[in-house]
Amino acid sequence: MKSFLHPVVGPLELHYQTLELTEDPGLSLTIYPPVPGSPTADALRVLASWAATEGIGERARSRV
């Protein structure tokens, strides 16, 4: 498990798994999925919603 402290949503605790990429030796992909229904999953949902809303606002401002 890895812990992060996000400035907006606070503490996040994520399990992680590293996958070796067989097609590219020496490269790996690390994923950090939250436990479903956990406070971390809820916090990530809030961040995703916020990021999507910010992205819409940025695109709208760039069109003006």
Image (spheres, rainbow, N blue to C red):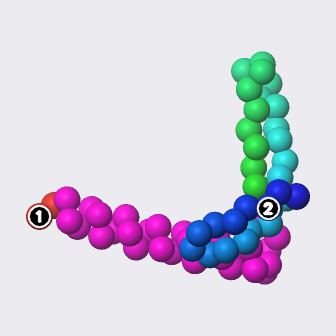
Q: Along the horizontal axis of the image, is 45 left or right of 4?
A: left
Q: Residue at x 37, y 64 (%)?
A: 55
Task: Give the answer, above or below, for where 1 lies relative to 26.
Answer: below
Camera sees residue 33: no
The amino acid on which the numbered mark 1 sits, given as a three-letter code, is: Val
Q: Residue furthest top?
A: 25
Which residue is label 1 attached to?
Answer: 64
Mark 2 residue crowding within 10 angstroms, few (<14) / some (14–19) / many (20+): few
Quarter in which the C terminus is drawn: bottom left
Give residue 32's quadrant in the image. Answer: bottom right
Q: Along the horizontal axis of the image, is 48 left or right of 40?
A: left
Helix, strand or loop for disc 1: loop
Q: Residue at x 67, y 74 (%)?
A: 10
Question: Over which residues does the magenta segment extend?
Answer: 33-62
Q: Residue at x 82, y 57 (%)?
A: 2
Camera sees residue 40: yes
Which residue is label 2 attached to?
Answer: 3
**Is residue 51 shown in magenta?**
yes
Q: Along the horizontal axis of the image, is 59 left or right of 53?
A: left
Q: Which circle, 2 or 1, is nearer the viewer? A: 2
Helix, strand or loop for disc 2: strand
Q: Residue at x 73, y 71 (%)?
A: 11
* Front-most of residues 10 and 31: 10
Q: Which secondary structure class fits the magenta region best? A: helix
**Is residue 61 shown in magenta?**
yes
Q: Along the horizontal axis of the image, is 26 left or right of 44?
A: right
Quarter in which the N terminus is drawn: bottom right
Point out the tag, 2 or 1, that comes first from the N-terminus.
2
Task: Give the answer, above or below, for where 38 lies relative to 56.
Answer: below
Question: Where does the image place residue 44, in percent across and percent down from the top left?
Answer: 64, 71
Question: Where does the image place residue 60, in percent across and percent down from the top left?
Answer: 23, 67
